Amino acid sequence: MLSIKNLKFYKPFKPLFFNKNLQSFTMAEVLITIGLIGLVAALTLPGVMDKYRQKALETGMSRFFSVMNQAFYLSTLDNGEEKYWDDYGDDSCAFYKRYLADYLKTTEYECGYYNRIDDNRFSKMDDDRFVGIYFPSGDMAVFSYGRTFTYTLNSKKYYKKYTALMSGGTSDKQDAYGRELFVFEIARKRADSANITNIRGIIPFHGLVSYSNEELLEFCKSSPYRCSALIVRNGWKVPKNYPYKIR
């Protein structure tokens, strides 16, 4: 039978953090620790971000290349082989509407380009030599002169802030090529000079000629708008000796 005499009473548990004999960190020690953590983060974070941007570019470029070539292929099913397509010359807008618009999944496209008026404003210029192509992934490209596609991941940052985003044009911001802008071209536009037949879709700019890896690297250094071929040649991976930092 339970009685008060049989009950045992225990002292309440006292957590360790109430132990007066334990030493606590001083403010100086806390600040030093935080400072060390910040220093390590400052040293490692840029490298992590560089790797992230590089990986994003590799994935994005490969996706863009695949999507564009699929569009060219689907277009041939309705419009015949590319060699029989109408030649619109520099009129990128007419070519895009006729042969690509119905075969690409985009959020929008627009003909023309944006010209800088002052430091904070840009004006839409009606120039059919240029077509801005915006993809659901956030990637974008500018189709220019009926021949080249300039690709970038930074669609919100660019296109509407470029004078013309041409492929190596004198009015371009040249130091963006090979770092943020990567140029491809319609393969058949280059096929004759490379003495190649039966090729369709797009290729890295000047990518049909059988240059060595060393030659491609030198071309990338001297003409950054030709760096796409170097990355594609390396299996859609930015080479370790790549001369520019991906932005």
Image (cartoon, rainbow, N blue to C red):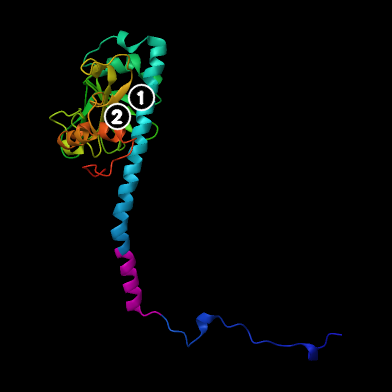
In the picture, which quadrant includes the N terminus? bottom right
Is label 2 or label 1 in front? Answer: 1
In the displayed image of the protein, which residue is found farthest to the left?
170
Q: Position of residue 172 (x, y in %)?
A: 16, 32
Quick check: is 35 in the magenta stretch?
Answer: yes
Sort mark 2 into few (<14), some (14-19) or many (20+) by Cα contacts within 10 Å: many
The residue located at (41%, 11%) in the rendering is: 78
Depicted 58 relative to depicted 74: above or below: below
The kind of residue tagged 1 is Met
| Tag shown at residue 141 | 2
Q: Is residue 13 left or right of residue 62?
A: right
The kind of residue tagged 2 is Ala
The secondary structure making up most of the magenta span is: helix
Do labels 2 and 1 touch, CB within 8 Å?
A: yes
| Tag shown at residue 68 | 1
Magenta extent: 25-39
Quick check: is 141 in the magenta stretch?
Answer: no
User: In which quarter of the view is residue 3 placed?
Assistant: bottom right
Q: Position of residue 102 (x, y in %)?
A: 39, 18
